[in-house]
Amino acid sequence: MTLELIVSKIWKIYNGRPILRDLSFVFDKKEIYVIMGPNGSGKTTFLKICALLETPDKGEVFYLNSDKKRIPEDINLFRKITYVFPEVGIFNASVFDNVAYGLKIRGLKKKEIVSRVEEVLDFVGLTHKKKQDALTLSSGEAKRMGIARAIVIEPEFIFLDEPTAFVDMENTEIVKKILLQIKERGKSTIIIATHDTHFASKVGDIILKLENGKLLTENFA
Amino acid sequence: MEFLIEAFKKALFLIINLDREFLEIISLSLKVSISALIIASIFGIPLGAFLGMKKFPGRNVVIVFLNTGMGLPPVVVGLFLYMLFSRSGPLGFLYLLYTPTAMIIAQFVLAFPIVTALSQASITKVDPIIKLTAKTLGATPFQVALTIIKEARYGILAGVIAGLGRVMAEVGAILIVGGNIAGYTRVMTTTIALETDKGNFELALALGIILLTISFLINTTLYFIQKKGVPANIT
Protein backbone atom coordinates (compact mmCIF):
# COMPACT_ATOMS: atom_id res chain seq x y z
CA MET A 1 0.00 0.00 0.00
CA THR A 2 1.30 3.44 -0.90
CA LEU A 3 0.52 6.28 1.43
CA GLU A 4 0.06 9.92 0.57
CA LEU A 5 0.30 12.69 3.10
CA ILE A 6 -2.12 15.55 2.64
CA VAL A 7 -1.55 18.81 4.45
CA SER A 8 -4.60 20.98 4.02
CA LYS A 9 -4.77 24.66 4.97
CA ILE A 10 -3.08 24.30 8.32
CA TRP A 11 -2.45 27.09 10.79
CA LYS A 12 -0.32 26.98 13.90
CA ILE A 13 -0.12 29.93 16.21
CA TYR A 14 2.42 30.37 19.04
CA ASN A 15 2.11 33.29 21.43
CA GLY A 16 -0.20 35.10 19.05
CA ARG A 17 2.26 34.70 16.15
CA PRO A 18 1.27 32.44 13.25
CA ILE A 19 4.10 29.97 12.60
CA LEU A 20 2.22 28.18 9.85
CA ARG A 21 -0.37 30.08 7.79
CA ASP A 22 -2.91 28.38 5.60
CA LEU A 23 -0.26 25.91 4.51
CA SER A 24 -1.15 23.14 2.07
CA PHE A 25 1.01 20.49 0.47
CA VAL A 26 0.83 16.93 -0.82
CA PHE A 27 3.66 14.47 -0.18
CA ASP A 28 3.03 11.65 -2.63
CA LYS A 29 6.41 10.53 -3.94
CA LYS A 30 8.91 8.01 -2.60
CA GLU A 31 11.56 10.66 -2.64
CA ILE A 32 13.45 12.90 -0.28
CA TYR A 33 11.69 16.14 0.61
CA VAL A 34 13.78 18.68 2.47
CA ILE A 35 12.17 21.49 4.41
CA MET A 36 14.53 24.35 5.00
CA GLY A 37 14.31 27.52 6.99
CA PRO A 38 16.09 29.36 9.75
CA ASN A 39 15.71 28.51 13.43
CA GLY A 40 12.24 29.38 14.68
CA SER A 41 10.68 29.26 11.23
CA GLY A 42 8.42 26.35 12.26
CA LYS A 43 10.18 23.45 10.52
CA THR A 44 10.00 21.15 13.52
CA THR A 45 6.40 22.12 14.26
CA PHE A 46 5.47 21.40 10.66
CA LEU A 47 7.29 18.07 10.72
CA LYS A 48 5.61 17.04 13.97
CA ILE A 49 2.19 17.98 12.63
CA CYS A 50 2.85 15.90 9.52
CA ALA A 51 3.94 12.98 11.72
CA LEU A 52 0.74 13.38 13.80
CA LEU A 53 2.74 14.23 16.91
CA GLU A 54 1.11 17.65 17.12
CA THR A 55 -2.20 18.99 15.91
CA PRO A 56 -2.69 22.17 13.91
CA ASP A 57 -4.85 24.98 15.28
CA LYS A 58 -6.77 25.06 12.02
CA GLY A 59 -6.80 22.89 8.91
CA GLU A 60 -6.04 19.18 8.79
CA VAL A 61 -3.40 16.63 8.08
CA PHE A 62 -4.28 13.14 6.96
CA TYR A 63 -3.02 10.15 5.04
CA LEU A 64 -4.60 8.53 2.01
CA ASN A 65 -4.16 4.92 0.95
CA SER A 66 -3.58 3.79 -2.63
CA ASP A 67 -7.34 3.96 -3.24
CA LYS A 68 -7.21 7.64 -2.23
CA LYS A 69 -9.24 6.81 0.85
CA ARG A 70 -8.51 8.55 4.11
CA ILE A 71 -6.82 6.30 6.69
CA PRO A 72 -8.07 6.50 10.28
CA GLU A 73 -5.58 7.75 12.84
CA ASP A 74 -4.94 4.55 14.71
CA ILE A 75 -2.03 2.32 15.61
CA ASN A 76 -2.03 0.78 12.10
CA LEU A 77 -1.30 4.20 10.62
CA PHE A 78 1.17 5.17 13.36
CA ARG A 79 3.12 2.02 12.57
CA LYS A 80 3.63 3.16 8.98
CA ILE A 81 5.23 6.47 9.90
CA THR A 82 8.23 7.19 12.06
CA TYR A 83 10.16 10.18 13.31
CA VAL A 84 13.84 10.58 14.16
CA PHE A 85 14.42 13.36 16.66
CA PRO A 86 17.52 15.62 16.58
CA GLU A 87 18.64 14.20 19.92
CA VAL A 88 18.11 10.49 19.33
CA GLY A 89 16.13 8.93 22.17
CA ILE A 90 18.36 6.06 23.20
CA PHE A 91 16.93 3.19 25.22
CA ASN A 92 19.15 1.97 28.03
CA ALA A 93 20.02 -1.23 26.17
CA SER A 94 22.41 -2.55 23.54
CA VAL A 95 22.55 -1.16 20.00
CA PHE A 96 20.93 -4.38 18.78
CA ASP A 97 18.04 -4.11 21.24
CA ASN A 98 17.50 -0.46 20.37
CA VAL A 99 17.21 -1.27 16.69
CA ALA A 100 15.10 -4.35 17.36
CA TYR A 101 12.58 -2.37 19.46
CA GLY A 102 10.11 -1.57 16.69
CA LEU A 103 10.10 -5.19 15.52
CA LYS A 104 9.67 -6.63 19.01
CA ILE A 105 6.63 -4.48 19.75
CA ARG A 106 5.13 -5.67 16.48
CA GLY A 107 5.47 -9.24 17.73
CA LEU A 108 7.81 -10.48 15.03
CA LYS A 109 9.55 -13.82 15.48
CA LYS A 110 13.06 -13.76 16.94
CA LYS A 111 14.64 -15.22 13.82
CA GLU A 112 13.17 -12.51 11.62
CA ILE A 113 14.11 -9.79 14.12
CA VAL A 114 17.73 -10.96 14.17
CA SER A 115 17.94 -11.14 10.41
CA ARG A 116 16.36 -7.71 9.81
CA VAL A 117 18.32 -5.94 12.54
CA GLU A 118 21.61 -7.39 11.34
CA GLU A 119 20.86 -6.34 7.78
CA VAL A 120 20.05 -2.77 8.85
CA LEU A 121 23.05 -2.52 11.17
CA ASP A 122 25.23 -3.58 8.28
CA PHE A 123 23.51 -0.97 6.12
CA VAL A 124 24.37 1.86 8.54
CA GLY A 125 27.82 0.49 9.35
CA LEU A 126 27.18 -0.40 12.97
CA THR A 127 27.49 -4.19 12.87
CA HIS A 128 30.63 -4.11 15.00
CA LYS A 129 28.78 -2.10 17.66
CA LYS A 130 25.67 -4.27 17.94
CA LYS A 131 26.45 -5.58 21.43
CA GLN A 132 27.64 -2.21 22.72
CA ASP A 133 25.62 -0.23 25.27
CA ALA A 134 23.82 2.26 23.01
CA LEU A 135 24.27 5.06 25.55
CA THR A 136 28.01 4.93 24.92
CA LEU A 137 27.77 5.62 21.17
CA SER A 138 29.17 8.86 19.75
CA SER A 139 26.56 11.37 18.57
CA GLY A 140 27.20 10.46 14.93
CA GLU A 141 26.84 6.75 15.65
CA ALA A 142 23.72 7.42 17.72
CA LYS A 143 22.23 9.28 14.78
CA ARG A 144 22.97 6.33 12.48
CA MET A 145 21.44 3.99 15.04
CA GLY A 146 18.35 6.22 15.17
CA ILE A 147 18.01 5.96 11.40
CA ALA A 148 18.58 2.18 11.51
CA ARG A 149 15.87 1.87 14.16
CA ALA A 150 13.49 3.85 11.97
CA ILE A 151 14.13 2.00 8.71
CA VAL A 152 14.13 -1.50 10.16
CA ILE A 153 10.36 -1.25 10.58
CA GLU A 154 10.09 -0.38 6.89
CA PRO A 155 7.86 2.66 7.34
CA GLU A 156 6.19 4.41 4.45
CA PHE A 157 7.08 7.82 5.85
CA ILE A 158 10.29 8.72 7.68
CA PHE A 159 10.54 12.15 9.25
CA LEU A 160 14.01 13.33 10.18
CA ASP A 161 14.40 16.45 12.25
CA GLU A 162 17.86 18.00 11.81
CA PRO A 163 19.63 14.73 10.93
CA THR A 164 23.01 16.44 10.87
CA ALA A 165 22.64 18.21 14.24
CA PHE A 166 25.42 17.25 16.69
CA VAL A 167 27.10 15.22 13.94
CA ASP A 168 30.66 15.63 12.62
CA MET A 169 31.55 15.94 8.91
CA GLU A 170 32.39 12.27 8.53
CA ASN A 171 29.13 11.08 10.02
CA THR A 172 27.16 13.71 8.08
CA GLU A 173 28.57 12.15 4.93
CA ILE A 174 27.58 8.67 6.13
CA VAL A 175 24.06 9.87 7.02
CA LYS A 176 23.76 11.38 3.55
CA LYS A 177 24.77 8.10 1.89
CA ILE A 178 22.36 6.13 4.05
CA LEU A 179 19.45 8.42 3.16
CA LEU A 180 20.21 8.19 -0.54
CA GLN A 181 20.34 4.41 -0.30
CA ILE A 182 17.01 4.33 1.54
CA LYS A 183 15.54 6.37 -1.29
CA GLU A 184 16.98 3.92 -3.83
CA ARG A 185 15.07 1.13 -2.10
CA GLY A 186 11.90 3.03 -3.03
CA LYS A 187 9.90 1.94 0.02
CA SER A 188 9.70 5.20 1.95
CA THR A 189 8.94 8.86 1.57
CA ILE A 190 11.59 10.77 3.50
CA ILE A 191 10.84 14.23 4.85
CA ILE A 192 13.74 16.09 6.40
CA ALA A 193 13.79 19.38 8.29
CA THR A 194 17.21 21.02 8.29
CA HIS A 195 18.92 24.38 8.17
CA ASP A 196 22.02 22.80 6.61
CA THR A 197 21.88 24.13 3.03
CA HIS A 198 24.79 22.02 1.81
CA PHE A 199 23.29 18.81 3.17
CA ALA A 200 19.85 19.71 1.76
CA SER A 201 21.27 20.30 -1.71
CA LYS A 202 23.08 16.93 -1.65
CA VAL A 203 20.19 14.72 -0.52
CA GLY A 204 16.99 16.53 -1.44
CA ASP A 205 14.91 15.67 -4.49
CA ILE A 206 12.35 18.32 -3.61
CA ILE A 207 13.57 21.26 -1.57
CA LEU A 208 10.98 23.37 0.18
CA LYS A 209 11.51 26.54 2.14
CA LEU A 210 9.36 27.52 5.07
CA GLU A 211 9.03 31.27 4.96
CA ASN A 212 6.47 33.44 6.73
CA GLY A 213 4.44 30.36 7.55
CA LYS A 214 4.22 29.23 3.91
CA LEU A 215 5.99 26.42 2.10
CA LEU A 216 7.80 27.57 -1.04
CA THR A 217 9.68 25.55 -3.60
CA GLU A 218 13.38 26.26 -3.43
CA ASN A 219 15.67 25.96 -6.38
CA PHE A 220 19.39 25.59 -5.80
CA ALA A 221 20.27 25.38 -9.46
CA MET B 1 35.58 -6.31 77.78
CA GLU B 2 35.90 -9.99 78.61
CA PHE B 3 32.13 -10.35 78.73
CA LEU B 4 31.88 -8.81 75.25
CA ILE B 5 34.45 -11.22 73.82
CA GLU B 6 32.68 -14.13 75.50
CA ALA B 7 29.31 -13.06 74.09
CA PHE B 8 30.84 -12.65 70.66
CA LYS B 9 32.39 -16.15 70.80
CA LYS B 10 29.06 -17.69 71.82
CA ALA B 11 27.33 -15.76 69.04
CA LEU B 12 29.75 -17.13 66.47
CA PHE B 13 29.20 -20.62 67.92
CA LEU B 14 25.44 -20.21 67.38
CA ILE B 15 25.97 -19.11 63.81
CA ILE B 16 28.42 -21.88 62.96
CA ASN B 17 26.28 -24.60 64.57
CA LEU B 18 23.17 -23.38 62.77
CA ASP B 19 21.09 -23.53 65.92
CA ARG B 20 17.47 -24.53 65.13
CA GLU B 21 15.78 -21.69 67.01
CA PHE B 22 18.26 -19.27 65.51
CA LEU B 23 17.50 -20.50 61.96
CA GLU B 24 13.74 -20.38 62.56
CA ILE B 25 13.96 -16.76 63.62
CA ILE B 26 16.00 -15.80 60.55
CA SER B 27 13.66 -17.77 58.29
CA LEU B 28 10.52 -16.08 59.68
CA SER B 29 12.19 -12.65 59.42
CA LEU B 30 12.98 -13.23 55.76
CA LYS B 31 9.54 -14.68 55.04
CA VAL B 32 7.72 -11.74 56.63
CA SER B 33 9.90 -9.03 55.11
CA ILE B 34 10.10 -10.53 51.62
CA SER B 35 6.34 -11.23 51.55
CA ALA B 36 5.63 -7.64 52.61
CA LEU B 37 8.04 -6.37 50.00
CA ILE B 38 6.56 -8.47 47.19
CA ILE B 39 3.06 -7.21 47.99
CA ALA B 40 4.34 -3.63 48.31
CA SER B 41 6.02 -4.00 44.89
CA ILE B 42 2.94 -5.50 43.25
CA PHE B 43 0.90 -2.46 44.29
CA GLY B 44 3.64 0.16 44.58
CA ILE B 45 5.39 -0.16 41.22
CA PRO B 46 2.23 0.20 39.08
CA LEU B 47 0.99 3.07 41.26
CA GLY B 48 4.42 4.74 41.09
CA ALA B 49 4.40 4.26 37.32
CA PHE B 50 0.92 5.77 37.07
CA LEU B 51 1.92 8.76 39.21
CA GLY B 52 5.11 9.18 37.20
CA MET B 53 3.38 9.17 33.84
CA LYS B 54 -0.04 10.72 34.35
CA LYS B 55 -0.92 14.24 35.37
CA PHE B 56 -4.24 14.59 37.19
CA PRO B 57 -5.73 16.92 39.81
CA GLY B 58 -4.49 16.01 43.27
CA ARG B 59 -1.41 14.17 41.97
CA ASN B 60 0.95 16.38 43.96
CA VAL B 61 -1.05 15.76 47.13
CA VAL B 62 -0.70 12.00 46.63
CA ILE B 63 3.06 12.40 46.09
CA VAL B 64 3.42 14.49 49.25
CA PHE B 65 1.50 11.84 51.22
CA LEU B 66 3.73 9.10 49.83
CA ASN B 67 6.89 11.04 50.64
CA THR B 68 5.56 11.56 54.16
CA GLY B 69 4.81 7.84 54.32
CA MET B 70 8.47 7.10 53.63
CA GLY B 71 9.27 8.42 57.06
CA LEU B 72 6.39 6.79 58.95
CA PRO B 73 7.49 5.87 62.49
CA PRO B 74 7.11 2.06 62.75
CA VAL B 75 5.70 2.26 66.28
CA VAL B 76 2.93 4.55 65.06
CA VAL B 77 2.12 2.09 62.26
CA GLY B 78 2.13 -0.69 64.86
CA LEU B 79 -0.17 1.30 67.13
CA PHE B 80 -2.72 2.00 64.37
CA LEU B 81 -2.73 -1.59 63.17
CA TYR B 82 -3.04 -2.83 66.76
CA MET B 83 -6.11 -0.65 67.19
CA LEU B 84 -7.53 -1.95 63.90
CA PHE B 85 -6.85 -5.63 64.62
CA SER B 86 -7.51 -5.71 68.36
CA ARG B 87 -10.64 -7.62 69.39
CA SER B 88 -12.64 -4.43 69.89
CA GLY B 89 -11.21 -2.83 66.72
CA PRO B 90 -13.04 -2.61 63.36
CA LEU B 91 -11.05 -5.55 61.93
CA GLY B 92 -10.96 -7.55 65.14
CA PHE B 93 -13.19 -10.23 63.63
CA LEU B 94 -10.29 -11.24 61.36
CA TYR B 95 -8.24 -12.43 64.40
CA LEU B 96 -5.03 -11.19 62.84
CA LEU B 97 -3.38 -9.71 65.90
CA TYR B 98 -0.22 -11.57 66.99
CA THR B 99 0.06 -13.47 63.70
CA PRO B 100 2.73 -13.38 60.99
CA THR B 101 0.01 -12.02 58.66
CA ALA B 102 -0.35 -8.92 60.85
CA MET B 103 3.44 -8.51 60.72
CA ILE B 104 3.41 -8.73 56.93
CA ILE B 105 0.66 -6.10 56.80
CA ALA B 106 2.65 -3.81 59.12
CA GLN B 107 5.78 -4.13 57.01
CA PHE B 108 3.74 -3.67 53.84
CA VAL B 109 2.51 -0.33 55.23
CA LEU B 110 6.13 0.70 55.82
CA ALA B 111 7.53 -0.53 52.48
CA PHE B 112 4.68 0.56 50.22
CA PRO B 113 5.35 4.35 50.31
CA ILE B 114 9.08 3.79 49.72
CA VAL B 115 8.60 1.50 46.73
CA THR B 116 5.86 3.72 45.28
CA ALA B 117 7.57 7.07 45.80
CA LEU B 118 10.94 5.90 44.49
CA SER B 119 9.31 4.22 41.50
CA GLN B 120 7.44 7.45 40.77
CA ALA B 121 10.64 9.50 41.11
CA SER B 122 12.57 7.18 38.77
CA ILE B 123 9.81 7.16 36.17
CA THR B 124 9.44 10.94 36.27
CA LYS B 125 13.16 11.23 35.56
CA VAL B 126 13.00 9.19 32.35
CA ASP B 127 13.78 11.54 29.47
CA PRO B 128 10.50 12.51 27.68
CA ILE B 129 12.24 11.77 24.36
CA ILE B 130 12.09 8.06 25.28
CA LYS B 131 8.30 8.18 25.41
CA LEU B 132 8.12 10.01 22.08
CA THR B 133 10.64 7.65 20.48
CA ALA B 134 8.68 4.59 21.57
CA LYS B 135 5.50 6.16 20.21
CA THR B 136 7.06 7.04 16.86
CA LEU B 137 8.39 3.50 16.51
CA GLY B 138 4.82 2.22 16.69
CA ALA B 139 4.35 1.37 20.36
CA THR B 140 0.81 1.22 21.71
CA PRO B 141 0.14 3.33 24.86
CA PHE B 142 0.58 0.20 26.98
CA GLN B 143 3.88 -0.64 25.25
CA VAL B 144 5.04 2.95 25.76
CA ALA B 145 4.29 2.63 29.49
CA LEU B 146 6.20 -0.66 29.69
CA THR B 147 9.14 0.92 27.87
CA ILE B 148 9.25 3.79 30.36
CA ILE B 149 9.11 1.37 33.29
CA LYS B 150 11.93 -0.62 31.71
CA GLU B 151 14.00 2.54 31.32
CA ALA B 152 13.46 3.31 35.00
CA ARG B 153 14.21 -0.26 36.08
CA TYR B 154 17.38 0.49 38.03
CA GLY B 155 15.70 3.26 40.00
CA ILE B 156 12.67 1.06 40.66
CA LEU B 157 14.87 -1.81 41.79
CA ALA B 158 16.78 0.56 44.04
CA GLY B 159 13.42 1.56 45.57
CA VAL B 160 12.49 -2.07 46.17
CA ILE B 161 15.83 -2.77 47.82
CA ALA B 162 15.54 0.39 49.93
CA GLY B 163 12.11 -0.90 51.00
CA LEU B 164 13.67 -4.23 51.98
CA GLY B 165 16.32 -2.41 54.00
CA ARG B 166 13.61 -0.49 55.82
CA VAL B 167 11.47 -3.50 56.74
CA MET B 168 14.32 -5.82 57.64
CA ALA B 169 15.59 -3.33 60.18
CA GLU B 170 12.33 -2.21 61.77
CA VAL B 171 11.21 -3.47 65.14
CA GLY B 172 8.44 -1.21 66.46
CA ALA B 173 5.54 -2.22 64.24
CA ILE B 174 6.07 -5.98 64.23
CA LEU B 175 6.71 -6.05 67.95
CA ILE B 176 3.32 -4.44 68.60
CA VAL B 177 1.24 -6.44 66.09
CA GLY B 178 3.26 -9.68 66.23
CA GLY B 179 3.69 -9.90 69.96
CA ASN B 180 7.13 -11.57 69.72
CA ILE B 181 5.75 -15.05 70.40
CA ALA B 182 8.52 -17.67 70.46
CA GLY B 183 8.39 -20.01 67.48
CA TYR B 184 5.48 -18.13 65.92
CA THR B 185 6.02 -14.39 65.52
CA ARG B 186 9.54 -13.94 66.83
CA VAL B 187 11.85 -12.38 64.25
CA MET B 188 15.41 -11.08 64.30
CA THR B 189 14.81 -7.53 65.42
CA THR B 190 12.21 -8.39 68.08
CA THR B 191 14.44 -11.18 69.40
CA ILE B 192 17.39 -8.83 69.66
CA ALA B 193 15.26 -6.38 71.66
CA LEU B 194 13.93 -9.10 73.96
CA GLU B 195 17.18 -11.01 74.50
CA THR B 196 19.08 -7.78 75.21
CA ASP B 197 16.45 -6.98 77.85
CA LYS B 198 16.98 -10.42 79.38
CA GLY B 199 20.75 -10.04 79.31
CA ASN B 200 21.07 -12.97 76.89
CA PHE B 201 23.56 -11.29 74.63
CA GLU B 202 24.89 -14.21 72.58
CA LEU B 203 21.64 -14.86 70.66
CA ALA B 204 21.05 -11.11 70.29
CA LEU B 205 24.59 -10.62 69.04
CA ALA B 206 24.42 -13.60 66.66
CA LEU B 207 21.21 -12.23 65.14
CA GLY B 208 22.74 -8.77 65.06
CA ILE B 209 25.64 -10.12 63.00
CA ILE B 210 23.22 -11.77 60.56
CA LEU B 211 21.12 -8.60 60.37
CA LEU B 212 24.20 -6.50 59.72
CA THR B 213 25.35 -8.93 57.03
CA ILE B 214 21.94 -8.74 55.34
CA SER B 215 22.00 -4.94 55.61
CA PHE B 216 25.51 -4.91 54.14
CA LEU B 217 24.39 -7.10 51.23
CA ILE B 218 21.33 -4.91 50.62
CA ASN B 219 23.41 -1.76 50.59
CA THR B 220 26.10 -3.26 48.38
CA THR B 221 23.44 -4.30 45.87
CA LEU B 222 21.88 -0.85 46.10
CA TYR B 223 25.24 0.81 45.50
CA PHE B 224 25.91 -1.20 42.35
CA ILE B 225 22.38 -0.70 41.04
CA GLN B 226 22.60 3.06 41.54
CA LYS B 227 26.00 3.11 39.91
CA LYS B 228 24.72 1.20 36.91
CA GLY B 229 21.50 2.90 36.13
CA VAL B 230 18.96 5.59 36.65
CA PRO B 231 19.46 7.39 39.94
CA ALA B 232 16.76 7.24 42.58
CA ASN B 233 16.40 9.71 45.42
CA ILE B 234 17.46 7.54 48.26
CA THR B 235 18.58 9.43 51.30
Image (cartoon, coloured by chain):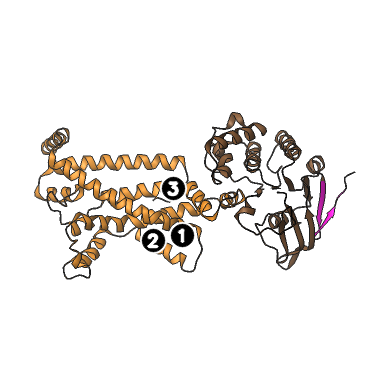
Chain colours: A brown, B orange
Q: Which residue is mark 3?
A: B155
Quarter of the picture holding the N terminus of chain B = top left
Based on the picture, tell me whether residue A218 belongs to the magenta stretch: yes
Q: Quadrant of residue A183?
A: top right
Whether residue B172 is visible here, answered yes or no, is no
Q: Position of residue B117 (x, y in %)?
A: 41, 56
Q: Report the front residue among A213 and A109.
A: A109
- Seen at 42% across and 41% down, the residue is B225
Q: Is residue A98 left or right of residue B10?
A: right
Q: Which residue is mark 2?
A: B66
Q: Which residue is mark 1?
A: B51
Q: Is residue B178 left or right of residue A181?
A: left
Where are the magenta residues, as a range? A206-221
Q: Which callout, 2 or 1, points to the residue nearer the camera? A: 1
- Seen at 31% across and 48% down, the residue is B165
Residue furthest to the top in view is: A128
As displayed, is residue A148 above or below residue A82? above
The lab-note entry on whether marks 3 and 1 share a chain reads yes
Disc 3 marks which amino acid?
Answer: Gly
Based on the picture, tell me whether residue B13 belongs to the magenta stretch: no
Q: Is residue A33 left or right of residue B96?
A: right
SS for dot 2:
helix
As displayed, is residue A68 above or below residue B27? below
Q: Which callout, 3 or 1, points to the residue nearer the camera? A: 1
Whether residue B101 is visible here, answered yes or no, is yes
The Cα atoms of the two marked residues, 3 and 1, are separated by 15 Å
Q: Position of residue B189 (x, y in %)?
A: 20, 49
